[in-house]
Image: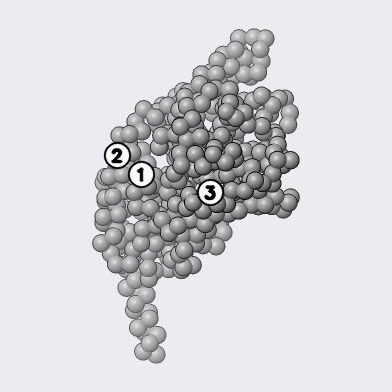
Amino acid sequence: MSHRPIYLDCHATTPVDERVLEAMLPYFTEHFGNPSSISHAYGWEAEAAVKQARQILADAIHATPEEIVFTSGATEANNLAIKGIAEAYFSKGRHIITVQTEHNAVLDPCQYLQSLGFEVTFLPVQQDGLIDLAQLEKTICPDTILVSVMAANNEIGVLQPLAEIGAICRQHQVLFHTDAAQAIAKIPLDVQAMNINLMSLTAHKVYGPKGIGALYVRRRNPRVQLSPQLHGGGHERGMRSGTLYTPQIVGFAKAVELGLETMESESKRLTQLRKRLWRQLSQLEGIHLNGHPTQRLSGNLNISVEGVDGSALLLGLQPVVAVSSGAACSSVKTAPSHVLMALGHSEKLAYTSIRFGIGRFNTTEEIDRVAAHAIATIESLRQSQAVSAKSSQMK
Ligand SMILES: *Cc1c(COP(=O)(O)O)cnc(C)c1O
């Protein structure tokens, strides 16, 4: 498949690892039972598989299996967490704190709650993409019920200081939710040490299948109340009804298990690849790194390029490398990335950003090919722009 571009868009999604697919396959045809069927072996087999998966996922974040609620992905988990908390705690308070650089699956539910009369603070970030902890603490008021801050940003890869945020939330007795869609099995996550009360997860960013995720909901110290957003058969202790999707759940757990096994070595390898790419690209003038230089996902490189047209740049890169500008989910819109705007970028620089998401199956050779092609593309775009500027001057 050498004719296809090199895939460097791992924050949008990742391919399913062959070992994950293999683990899933028997649960489509052979062990197809409904995990809720308690009266026969078909149900028991499926139930056993779900139980094992739940344990693996719980262990991955230092939770207990009862605290894992399966959802269709992180979008649903975020919706369940934010709207579910708002509904369950509105008599206690109506103020929610989140951050301007969150994924739309957090921002949009918060905006929806605003329309219902909740008050939402969208904290700004510093130039490096990190929140200001003192500002967070000052923003918490007696009416605050929830703080939602993502673990790892999907555009610039920045890792927020979860343990510090958790400590502040605990001290002020405010619930802490984190969207860890980009973080699971990539960085250590510990809901105990980090005082996290709710955590959104998804499988398809860590070489698992699309359409499956989970919400961690704390059961002790404190026991989190959550209003369900899907009512029905009372699955997942009433928090999320719907027949459990056994193959996807098995695949999700396998993906996380594989990710954890090699997390440290893979993180080192990806950091090297990212640095290699940056070393080459930054030899050009007018290239800016977006986000904190080290406190970021190892496979994330996000740059802004001066002096080129953003869409021309993407078009030029397309034959060789699959990357995106900003987030995949909002790339249908023509607005500049809200994340880069929050970093204080001019609209122009926000438009000419490229997100490289390096992953498990990328090689050094690929990185070098991408770097060479990106440099050639940028240079030629700059040259033709200079030529057309000159010719219009002469007219
Ligand atoms: C991908 C992503 C989501 C959405 O997850 P789905 O499982 O695709 O719904 C939410 N938040 C972040 C940070 C993401 O990267």
Image quarter where the N terminus lies is top left
| Residue 361: quarter of image | top left
**Kind of residue at disc 1:** Ser
Q: Earlier in the sequence, mark 2 or mark 3?
A: 3
- Image location of residue 41, percent across then percent down: 61, 9
* SS category of the residue bearing label 1: loop
> Would residue 21 be found to the left or right of residue 386 on screen?
right
Q: Please name the residue that numbered disc 2 is placed on.
A: 268
Q: Nearer the viewer, residue 28 or 188?
A: 188
Residues at discs 2 and 3 in contact (Cβ within 8 Å): no
- Image location of residue 200, percent across then percent down: 55, 37
Which label was assigned to residue 137?
Answer: 3
* SS category of the residue bearing label 3: helix
**Kind of residue at disc 2:** Lys
Residues at discs 2 and 1 in contact (Cβ within 8 Å): yes
Query: Which residue corresponds to the image point at 44% horizontal and 54% vertical from the top-left?
Result: 129
Which label was assigned to residue 298?
Answer: 1
Which label was assigned to residue 211?
Answer: none
For label 1, being within 8 Å of ligand 1 is answered no
Query: Which residue corresponds to the image point at 30% horizontal and 54% vertical from the top-left?
Result: 278
Give me the C-alpha separation between circle 2 and circle 3: 33 Å
| Residue 235: quarter of image | top right
Neighbours of disc 1 within 10 Å: few (<14), some (14-19), many (20+) = many
Q: Quick check: can you spot residue 19?
A: yes
